[in-house]
Image: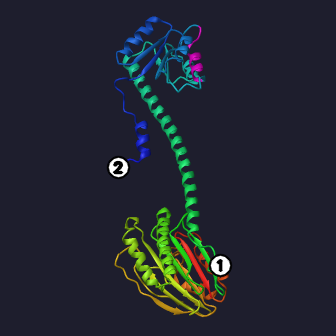
Amino acid sequence: MLKQTAWEQLVFPRINPQPDTATPGIIMIVDDLPDNLRLLEIVLKGKGFQVFQARSGSEALALLNLVLPDVIFLDLMMPDMDGLEVTRRIRAMTELPYIPIVLLTASQDNKAKITGLDAGADEFLAKPFSQPELIARARSLIRLRRYNQALAQAVQDNRYLNDLLLTENTRMAEELERTRQAQMRLMPQAGPDYPGVSFAVYYQPALEVGGDYYDYVRLDEERFVVVLGDAVGKGGAAVLAVAVIKSVLATEFAHALQEKSTFEPAQVLERINGVICGPMESSQTEMTLFCGLVDLGRRTIRYSNAGQTFPLLARTGSVQELKLGGLPIGLFSDATYSTQEICFEQGDRLMLYSDGLNEATDLQHEQFGFDRLRAAVLAHAGLSPQPMLEGIMEQVHLFCQDADDDQTLVIFGF
């Protein structure tokens, strides 16, 4: 048997009510003749129905202020107020839940039946009535009324759940916006303040919040560190992973500044991985991460990589991948990383990007791919970082307008 959802568990019992054999229903009988009332009462009570009597139309209307029957058996021909008028007045009581009305009549006049149906009656029962038919009509109409009540309750429950859903969606949207703002505060909006260094960034999460992360940290007058990472997953879990990585990185940077020690990217990645796989293992953080040390005095980039896309060093006429592999952070506590170093020249551009760019997919499920990305970089390599970034992203967006992954592009110009 399939497991029901919470909504189905709420609604299905109401739509499919179990018959209550102990209390089969409440019936009001209305007739001006005491013998008819007595006969109806004996027959109906004999089958377990709870019966209330009214000897006139006005008495029946007054009784409805005290009793809410499941069915009304109403004599058509009564003095003062006949069954048609009683039916019309009951149907005019808009605050009253719908109650099936059966008109009792000895007349075979079809016109009278049509008039009764127009007045709001549900059925007719001919006098003298058959007791089995009377019981069958009562049970059938009570069952129908209970299903109608269940349906009305389901509609009410649905409105209530919709209101709850709207409230929860509003709360979640507000929470996501606060999370988005907090995430943006984790990443710099301006580049490092060094003469001859310019900076441009594009960051667009696929959801309200994403798992991409970029940062830079000033070490001294000539050196700064750049990082770019991609946390596993999206949403709140990814934001938590980014916050964890940033916190550990901040500790490493503070240590390097305080001790004035040599900053070695590979060792930093190993220490971050040790913390994530050790004391912070319960956070279940996994992240690819590139870490590079830019030395403006020596004009070098010393870097290490933990599974992140290979950055590009672009200059007019050429694009070089900074190829260096490594296991993502948070997988194995004994993971080790290596370091490489490359020289850059004046006019070069260091480009860090997430896989949301090269893996962007069009409607035919074709990826933008590295070849297109390389061509876009070459086409704009002579520009300063901001127009270069805008030109590259324009090519990506022309290829794929709706991204299904976070997209981050950071360009440093020297």
- As drawn, is 20 to the left or to the right of 218? left
For marks 1 and 2, give the CA distance: 52 Å
Q: Position of residue 179 (x, y in %)?
A: 55, 61
Q: Which residue occupies the foreground of this view, 323 or 391?
A: 323
Q: Which residue is mark 2?
A: 2
Does the magenta stretch mainly form a helix, a strand or a loop?
helix
Q: Which residue occupies the foreground of this view, 50 or 85?
A: 50
Q: Which residue occupies the foreground of this view, 284 or 52?
A: 284
Q: Is residue 197 above or below residue 398?
A: below
- As drawn, is 213 to the left or to the right of 132? right
Q: Is residue 65 visible?
A: yes
Residue 322 magenta? no
Q: Position of residue 291 (x, y in %)?
A: 49, 81
Residue 24 sits in which quadrant?
top left
Outermost residue, top direction?
34
Magenta part of the protein: which range?
Answer: 80-91
Of pointers 1 and 2, the one earlier in the residue sequence:
2
Q: Amino acid at mark 1?
A: Glu
Q: Give yes or no for contact between labels 1 and 2 (Cβ–Cβ under 8 Å).
A: no
Q: Is residue 328 visible?
A: no
- As drawn, is 302 to the left or to the right of 196? left
Residue 87 magenta? yes
Indicate which label's residue lies in the foreground, 1 or 2: 1
Q: Secondary structure at mark 1?
A: helix
Q: Residue at x 45, y 33 (%)?
A: 147
Q: Amino acid at mark 2?
A: Leu
Q: Residue at x 50, y 63 (%)?
A: 235
Q: Which residue is mark 1?
A: 390
Residue 132 sits in which quadrant?
top left
Q: Secondary structure at mark 2?
A: loop
Q: Where residue 64 is drawn, which disc sits there?
A: none
Rendered-image quadrant of the C terminus? bottom right
